[in-house]
Amino acid sequence: MPDASFSKSPIDIASGHTVRRYDEELAKLRGIILEMGERVVEQTQSAVVALVERIEYQAYRVLDREPLIDYLSLDADEEIFRVIARRQPAAIDLRIVLALSKIAGEVERAGDKAARIARQALESLTLFNANPDLSSDELKEQLQQLNDKACCMFERSIRAVATFDVKLALGIFEDEPNLYSASNEVRQVLGESNHENLTPRQVVCLLTTAHALERIGNHASTIAEQVIYVALGQDVRYRNREILIDTLRHYGY
Amino acid sequence: MSTTVEAMDKAMSVMSSVELASAQHSRETVGDFTADDPRMTCRNVDVWYGSKQAIKNVNLDIGKNEVVSMIGPSGCGKSTFLRSLNRMNDTIVGCRVTGSIKLDGEEIYDKGLDPVPLRARVGMVFQKPNPFPKSIYENVAYGPRIHGLTNNKAELDELVESSLMKAGLWKEVKDRLDQPGTGLSGGQQQRLCIARTIAVSPEVILMDEPCSALDPIATAIVEELIDELRQNYSIAIVTHSMQQAARVSQRTAYFHLGDLIEVGETNHIFTNPQHKLTEDYITGRFG
């Protein structure tokens, strides 16, 4: 029997408060999170290109831009404090503010993962310079696929935040197996015999990158959980994912 | 009194004809309106001012040792409903209450029931502090004296002291009990009115926006008092401050155009209300 608590109609965040300034404050807060999310996607893609294509300046650029996401995270925190102090949000507004606070943390940590990949790109330039052919086309392709999966999930999670869209959030949960499968394939390729000439340090470098990309996908899932929390008022963290997906589908999402 | 009815008619006439037509049909209440251990039970309560229906088929329990807050926009009927719980509406010409309201299983609108002792059992604290133009002592002693609750002066003194202590006012006034109650600050006057209500040993205390005329410090003191009083009494409070409802009550009831739209645990109502009207009201999206 599906959980009836999910039967609540999705919210309409477009319907405004009597105090329009309140709407503006929440929109500003959401805007900061969306900007952070866009930057994270951009940073991740640049970092992976820097690693795969061995572009040093691009890796440095990712590292240089990483603090911008941190500063936006501080702006989000400040805005959250202001909204709580001024408006004492309740119900959906309270859920929005609490969720955006958690989402800001998730996005900021996803940004850290992009920077970690950029550092791996710089390290690989040193490690692979001795033998440039070590990073095979197959490995590049698998890494790129994992990157596409992770970035796609993350980008959709940010779009879901823009409108607290349950369908988009559900799609992210449904994509989790694909993410893990792409991540496993990278590990598998790294373990194949034609890569036996990779040094342990080089393997660690590529595994770290794969792990970081998988974690970005995990951040997307956590953000999707918060979207469900805002839209349906249900805390779905730690719930069995398959049952959750079935329940959401049952209610037409 | 007829002016009150006229005023009500005038207020109701601002509703559009469409709203009035729909107002005749009550909405189903979302949430559990029953209490585990009810002190008062209200079933299918309708209240009419002349031909205008102010309360529509409301069902609600007020449990022992709980605070139930009633919230909603102006004119939604929450004060009307509160006043019907101790027959205060009897004093309004043209006001008619139907349905069942029971106090400890006893129908309060039974023709044989005297409303005066009922109002001692179901006390009321109003929006504006309204001490009698008498001394602090007399304000508290008046009720017990007319209801014959004490046998001698010593007992009355003791009752006045304990009532003022329960209202958290004793320390502030014990040395000036003979001074006029109207000379106290607004917050103290409201606590004096609460002491006056407590003095006649009520079972239920009704509060109609008890803090709306008080500053934040006096409000905090009264809210603390409400929490303490809950240990001994059942309390129903009407408030326009949603933060206050969230702070002081265990259950919250949301009224809209005479309907009880939603009732539930306060924590739930203020974090995840089920009805859109409740959500719109408490998030300030109403209207």
Image (cartoon, coloured by chain):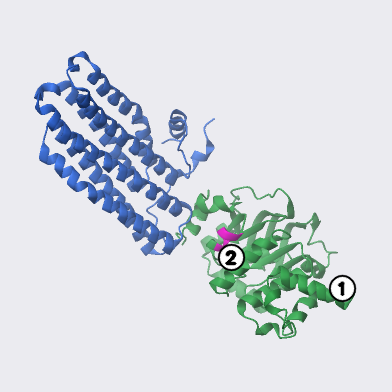
Chain colours: A blue, B green
Query: Is residue B92 shown left or right of residue B104?
Result: left
* Residue that mark 2 sits on: B239
Residue at 71% across, 48% down? B36
Q: Is residue A59 above or below residue B202?
A: above
The disc, 2 or 1, on the residue closer to the chain's N-terminal end is 1
Q: Which residues are magenta?
A: B244-248
Of all chains, the one bearing label 1 is B
When asked about the image quadrant of residue A245, the answer is top left
> Who's the residue at 74% across and 70% down the image?
B197
Q: Spot the residue most to the right.
A: B151
The quadrant of the image that shows the N terminus of chain B is bottom right
Give the letter of the chain under mark 2: B
Horizontal and vertical percent position of residue B91: 73, 73
Residue A53 among those drawn in magenta: no
> In the rendering, which numbered label is found on residue B148?
1
The residue lying at 29 percent from left, 41 percent from top is A110
On the image, the x and y values in percent for residue B187 come to 62, 75
Label 2: element kind: loop
Residue depicted at x 40% and y 48%:
A99
Is residue B246 shown in magenta?
yes
- Give the alpha-carbon distance from disc 2 to disc 1, as whole Å: 33 Å
Q: What x and y, as percent, mark residue A226? A: 40, 43
